[in-house]
Image: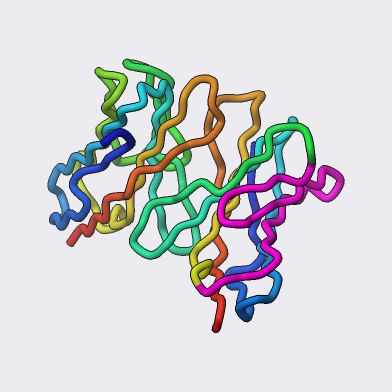
Amino acid sequence: AQSVAQPEDQVNVAEGNPLTVKCTYSVSGNPYLFWYVQYPNRGLQFLLKYITGDNLVKGSYGFEAEFNKSQTSFHLKKPSALVSDSALYFCAVRDPLYDYKLSFGAGTTVTVRA
Amino acid sequence: DAGITQSPRYKITETGRQVTLMCHQTWSHSYMFWYRQDLGHGLRLIYYSAAADITDKGEVPDGYVVSRSKTENFPLTLESATRSQTSVYFCASTGTRQETQYFGPGTRLLVL
């Protein structure tokens, strides 16, 4: 079975400070990992993914994430947060040994204060 | 416009009524998915489909029915709506050689 944990329900940062949203996963094989962002009353927007290759993945809007196999983590980061980054962030994992189903974390609400 | 659309965007119904939520994608993606989003649970998979006429249960399928007669459409039916099915429902799709699921705008359903 595959699963994802986002240990923080909320993350609060000041604009201009680094932003980190944590994610850990559990799969039986090599994981495919994803980050999505959801703005109020909107659908989920894809940010970035890790399939294979370089452990540091760069995505949309200046976000990046680092895959750490030994710690089974895929933390989302942004060097300098913007107020407009305030949203709900979801980490998701897929075990490619099975089908195309994704398992999502419960989500982390990010608030960036001016 | 190309993409994935859902209708209706908002729906209020009563307990016991049948409700159908529509999902349409223009990418000819093979895989389509239905999720529900509830506070504290993230997104949970209800049903998915690997191709036309191929569907399978997800994590929380009870009380829901799906069909997929055409590749581009994947309707979700609540046979007899219950209050516990009040939620936001998202449809998603992905192609055979892609890994990223792309999501529709969602349907907000209230069951009274």
- The quarter in which the N terminus of chain A is drawn is top right
At 17% across and 62% down in the image, what residue appears?
B112
A71 lies left or right of B14: right
B45 lies left or right of B5: right
Looking at the rendering, the stretch of residues picked out in magenta corresponds to: A55-83
Front residue of A61 and B56:
A61
B27 lies left or right of A12: left
Task: Check if residue B51 falls in the magenta segment.
Answer: no
Residue B65 position within the rendered picture, expressed as x and y whole percent measured from the top left: 28, 33
Give the color scheme: rainbow, by chain, secondary structure or one colour: rainbow
**Depicted A14 relative to depicted A92: above or below:** below
- The quarter in which the C terminus of chain A is drawn is bottom right
Front residue of A9 and B5:
B5
At 49% across and 66% down in the image, what residue appears?
A87
Front residue of B85 and A75:
A75
Residue B23 position within the rendered picture, expressed as x and y whole percent measured from the top left: 27, 36
At 60% across and 45% down in the image, what residue appears?
A48
